[in-house]
Amino acid sequence: MAEPSSSKPAVPLLKDELDIVIPTIRNLDFLEMWRPFFEPYHLIIVQDGDPNRTIKVPDGFDYELYNRNDINRILGPKASCISFKDSACRCFGYMVSKKKYIYTIDDDCFVAKDPSGKDINALEQHIKNLLCPSTPFFFNTLYDPYRAGADFVRGYPFSLREGAPTAVSHGLWLNIPDYDAPTQLVKPLERNTRYVDAVLTIPKGTLFPMCGMNLAFDRQLIGPAMYFGLMGDGQPIGRYDDMWAGWCVKVVCDHLGLGVKTGLPYIWHSKASNPFVNLKKEYKGIFWQEEIIPFFQSATIPKECTSVQKCYIELSKQVKEKLGAVDPYFTKLADAMVTWIEAWDELNSTTSEEASSKSANGAAAATK
Amino acid sequence: MAEPSSSKPAVPLLKDELDIVIPTIRNLDFLEMWRPFFEPYHLIIVQDGDPNRTIKVPDGFDYELYNRNDINRILGPKASCISFKDSACRCFGYMVSKKKYIYTIDDDCFVAKDPSGKDINALEQHIKNLLCPSTPFFFNTLYDPYRAGADFVRGYPFSLREGAPTAVSHGLWLNIPDYDAPTQLVKPLERNTRYVDAVLTIPKGTLFPMCGMNLAFDRQLIGPAMYFGLMGDGQPIGRYDDMWAGWCVKVVCDHLGLGVKTGLPYIWHSKASNPFVNLKKEYKGIFWQEEIIPFFQSATIPKECTSVQKCYIELSKQVKEKLGAVDPYFTKLADAMVTWIEAWDELNSTTSEEASSKSANGAAAATK
């Protein structure tokens, strides 16, 4: 198998099977730096905040753009499940995409360099992660056994060496680490300078904090569970959109025998967000997560749930029943989880040809 | 906290609290290379094979040496639990040590270099791993959160940030990777050249293939579970000594809330063992592990087992009951597990002062 490299491949991998989803409130100048890697792909831009504002996209990129008016028009009353004034709105892009794979990246993330000084093609590494199996059932001490120069070590059961399909590839960040507000406040100057040259599978039964900054996934395998919840405007919480998705996704992946990887690729995270603003958004989450995480750690999904949708609806019931007591917010969130699945199925139930034409009609505001 | 460095510290860490255990059949010339790092520590050499052979130890090292005659004399009939003609005999060294920590290393392991070309003080890194908590209950995507320049990422529950005591530090190998015989045969030229600059906790509930080549542990926390089983002479299996210990140790650590780390430090593994010989030793293990691993994955230890010894005796019962049907070997192994604990308690039941003098008397063959 080919070793991941940071050079631009002759034919971009999965060119017609992957969409790049970017939530933003500003002009997308950051794309200039990504041009060599992103230009061959289609972008789905989800414009947050004021829909009357014009977002400038550098020339040459192939994109569709949705603002709040578009979301409301396409989803109607179901638009209530899509957050406003929070990057959680990005999951609308997952829903309207018709591709098999999604890569999502924040607009303050730049191209990082590997230790040899070469630009890292983050997307290429994510694609390699997704196309290669995961090993959720037993830990391999030499990390990704499918990588060139590595393999399964002595004592790894042969029956598990085919691995499991990979649903999620979680990439990391050099420079500004993804810290919560209290840690940001305590360590304002900390920068992540350590390049750890590894991709590993998060074992079955283990939860992890999934960050949405630099994340790829297989929409067909796990898309309907990639809901970023109710955050931001009118909600009591923010900055837990990706965490919520990560907890749900991991429980569903574990149930369905799918793999979740973390590690490479790194992006360069340019700017720390304001820790005081973050603290205000986060403080309820910091408190609630002490109950939410044990809930997800012990959540089990019945065997009958054989699709992501069924798993997710089941999870929504358990959220309502068990987390509803923590705060009324979770009852609202559980309802939104159901609405999300209804909206997902509405946009994704047709055959792929019909779906694309429907999507093209639906997204009348899309500019190219 | 201090960043692990590969330089020799002014005062060697844990100088009087750690023994280095080395199983061998040959002269210990390999120690020359380790002199700057190992010389301050006490060595316990377990001589395998012909007890009449003289093993040469380079001048200046402080050591005691046990051959088969010593083991038989010290343990009497209980010596049956210590393997012969197999590096599994090293666990006798764990038993006679009176120190809190053990580092064990194979005599074909040399000092590796980090990417900057500096010699890696493997022992120092192991000690840092052991003295720092583990994080078995939730995954931290930036790896060891206690390392300088890293921390817990956003979404990591604050209630879990104290971590758990670390019982085991599993180090890795550059050059010759620890592959099983089939993989050795298929990839005779594969070398591990990837230096992954990370230490991570193996999550609770996840098993891993523990290699005994470069391994440190806290004897007080987990020692009695570090039994390397019945291998080699007179046994149907070899090269599964460390794997067996790893499965047992992980289940006991998970039950007792202790952590197991893997990753740094690397040693330089100089020589691949003969894959044809290995295949003969391994083939039953390759077959059996398909049943052993599910057994350990589902093993649960009752709450009443609050000491390592109690956990281990309980495990031995389950091994007899559930693996006895796989092969009569496991009935014998289960009995040996009990004998091991009896022998351990006999040598370790006295106070530390008494114990050291008893040990000194017992180890009459020890040379210095």
Image (tube, coloured by chain):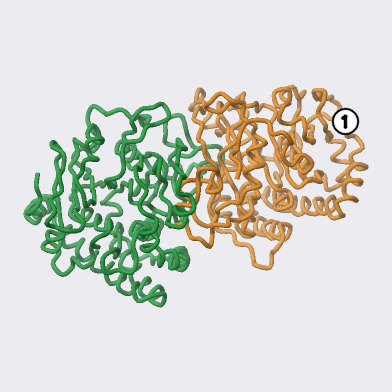
Chain colours: A orange, B green
Marks counted in the figure total 1
- In the image, residue A272 above or below residue B327: above
Percent coordinates x, y for residue A2 in the rendering: 61, 42
Residue at 45 percent across and 35 percent down: it is B197
* Closer-to-camera residue (B181/A155): B181
- In the image, residue A127 above or below residue A159: above
Q: Is residue A73 left or right of residue B41?
A: right
Q: Is residue B278 visible?
A: yes
Q: Mark 1 — residue?
A: A368
Residue at 62 percent across and 31 percent down: it is A6
Percent coordinates x, y for residue A64 in the rendering: 84, 34
Percent coordinates x, y for residue B28 in the rendering: 20, 44
Residue at 46 percent across and 57 percent down: it is B182
Identify the image quadrant of residue A127. top right
Residue at 11 percent across and 56 percent down: it is B52
Q: Is residue B153 left or right of residue A77?
A: left
**Amino acid type of the residue that numbered disc 1 sits on in the rendered structure:** Lys
- In the image, residue A57 above or below residue B23: above
Quarter that holds the N terminus of chain A:
top right
Percent coordinates x, y for residue A260 in the rendering: 60, 49
Q: Is residue A269 visible?
A: no
* Closer-to-camera residue (A242/B273): B273
Quarter that holds the C terminus of chain A:
top right
What is the secondary structure assignment of the residue under circle 1?
Answer: loop
Disc 1 packing (10 Å; few <14; some 14–19; many ≥20) = few
Q: Is residue A169 left or right of residue B102?
A: right
Chain letter for mark 1 = A
